[in-house]
Image (cartoon, rainbow, N blue to C red):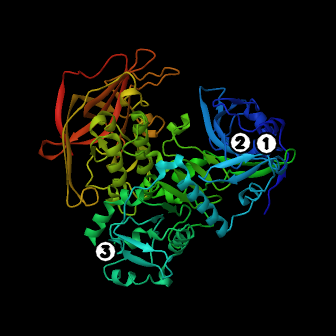
Amino acid sequence: MGVDEVNLCPFCVDWVEKGPVAEDSTAIAHYPTYGALVTSSRDCPLCSCLCALLSSELCFDGEPHEEQALQVVTQHSGQSNLDVSWGEYRICAESVLTPTITEATFTIAIRPSQGEQNTRILVTVTGGSWLTTSITHIGLIHKLSAWEGYQTTWDEKLRTIERWLQGCRDDPNHAGCRPQPFTPSRLVSVGLDGRAPRLIHTATSSGNETMEYATLSYRWGQLLPLRTMTTTLAQFTQELPPKLIPATFVEAMGIARAVGIPYIWIDALCIIQDDIKDWEREAAKIDMVYGGSQLTIAASDSADSSAGCFSLTTTDGRGSRDALFRHHGSGRCVRFYDGDVRDRPTRDSPLSSRGWTLQEQLLSPRVVSCMQPEMHWQCHGSHNVENGLSFGPVGNTAADARVPLRIPRVLPSPTSTRDPVQLRAAWENVVENYSARSLTFEHDRIPAISGILRHFAQVLNDDPVLGLWTTTISRDLAWTRLWVERPNRTQGDPRLPSWSWLACPGAATFLMLNQPLGEGLVHPGAKSHVRLQSWDVQWLGTPYTSPLKSACIQIEAPAMLIDMRPTEEQASGVLRGHYQVFGENLTNTAGEIRYRCFGLFDREDLTTPAKLLCLLLSTERESKGDSIREVFVIVEPVENGRYRRIGAARLTGTTPSFDLQKRMSLVLE
């Protein structure tokens, strides 16, 4: 398999030959309408990629409209140490009939022709940096299999991982990538000592010395053939049964050996699976386990432990609109990626659909994601792709703030001085990402995020209250359920309190009701009205990893009974979430939404009129105009004079609806 040589349209030729522009928000000269782009796509592969991207996002009466105006804008760009330039772009289509703008994001990477490479040489020097001089070409770029249309071999992948790891260790700019000193209770010896792989008790093997180890992030699948049980613990300390070791474990141990790491931590082997106390104790250290790892090996494309670290097939459709070709005129190779290529390890892989793996991805100082068609490397200092793409640390661009989960080290150390608004935005992204993931057992909903909770408690210098924070309680209580349900999770864990997004049966978000964050961790002009009076969370054993015994919060806020009525449009799904309140006039006015109230219920939509108790969380005055938004939580009484949350909503109008003097104190459970 090689790379097709193609001709491009004049706009795309100019784009490829000039390469990505350095300035962000720069418009790229291209076809002005979707119809012109469609016409060009018949002969230009790059235009064809853009059409395929838009056709999945942009529709009018079933088909994209030919006259819709197009604009391509650079979001940010750069160049790697291997002379591969890249740019992330946004393509916008504006409807001619409605005030609607549809956007899609894509990444383009360009490798220079062999003739252009002949004027440069890349040499590894002490410290892991790269020197560029005008001497002779030695073909490092030319030999990158990813640019020739071939899958890299096992040995090539190992050499790439070793180069990434050594470069990170040697580079003084990567001081933040150093693992925190920690040694887990048990580790697997990978065989660097000449013996067969075996389980070791570190307390009797290392004395007081910290042991270097790797970690594995993977999917168990339906059946895991090898697990440490109370009956196999003694046997595994002598030797792991070679015929029972799954392929993913075998390959992960091979990667660790290749880069000189003597041990690896694998949860199925290093935690006694049928010992509840051991499981709770070891799971409570998960943030330290991954935070102390020299390298986390992520089997990103593998459906289970039998597929190996490098699965040859994926089932998530990732990369279905990607393309690789060589421009006939310039000889330059072009890679087109659907979306931001950096999002793939944490958002677009089979591994990223599982709840447990999020904290493994985020808490590790270094992660190599074993993916198709290319591996990804992520650490504090860089994000590298196997084809030579190289990105700097998070926080350098506006887009980094937009997608805080881009690299694992979005979770800064407790000594970090990052902007609290960015930290809060990162937390909200964690919630949205995690709540959309699946777990085999719903009772793992808290343990599987416990390490991230402890980490953010240090970073934010705040007290966590089962996914909420004491200093931002008004915003935290305004989470809402997205309409897309998680697989196999329509009811949630009944032990979780109603006020926490952890109890949400679907993916949760903070942005349906709240405005984007501003200074002071609230939207500019917003005012909080709720006061957290007390909270009480009790566990049956180890906090966060044992079952929850009870949880409640007591809050005080302005309260009001609101008569909410569903409408025909709400029932049909045309205006889902919009309700009639206060007997408002619903006469249709062209160009205006008729409903003052927009709300989402936690379990099921409201289908019959009801008078509901509502507690005001915050008010926001729009920066333009006189509109006021009142965000509130909806509750209903339960036993013992307590209440539970059943939804959240907002009212929009020119005058406030809540009387701030009529406050109520109640306990939510």
Q: Mark 3 or 2, which is nearer the eye?
A: 3
Q: What amino acid type is highlighted by mark number 2?
A: Leu
Nearer-N-terminus badge (2/1) = 1
The span from disc 1 to disc 3 (Cα, nearest Å) is: 58 Å
Q: Secondary structure at mark 1?
A: helix
Q: Specify the label residue 41 is tagged with.
A: 1
Q: Count numbered badges in the picture.
A: 3
Q: Nearer the viewer, residue 275 or 641?
A: 275
Answer with the quarter of the image where residue 267 lies.
Answer: bottom left
For residue 457, above or below residue 290? above
Q: Which residue does the image show at 37% across and 56% down from the upper left?
A: 287
Left or right: residue 14 versus residue 82 is right
User: What type is the residue that disc 3 sits on?
Assistant: Asp
* Contact, mark 2 vs mark 1 (Cβ under 8 Å): yes
Nearer to us of marks 1 and 3 is 3
Q: In this orientation, which residue lies closer to the viewer: 106 or 389?
A: 389
Q: Which residue is mark 2?
A: 50
Separation of residues labelled 2 and 1 (CA atoms): 8 Å
Left or right: 665 in relation to 104: left
Question: Dot 3 lies on which element?
Answer: loop
Q: Count residues near mark 1 (Cα–Cα under 10 Å), then give few for <14, some for 14-19, many for 20+.
A: some
> Is any atom of residue 88 visible in this view?
no
Res 275 label? none
Residue 274: mark: 3
* Residue name at image x 25 percent, y 61 percent: 546
Percent from the top left, x then y, of residue 7?
85, 45
Residue drawn at x 83%, y 42% as measured from the top left: 8
- Label 3 and label 2: CA atoms lie apart by 52 Å
* Quadrant of the image containing the N terminus: bottom right
Q: Is residue 664 left or right of residue 127?
A: left
Q: Earlier in the sequence, mark 1 or mark 3?
A: 1
Give the x, y percent position of residue 303. Answer: 52, 66
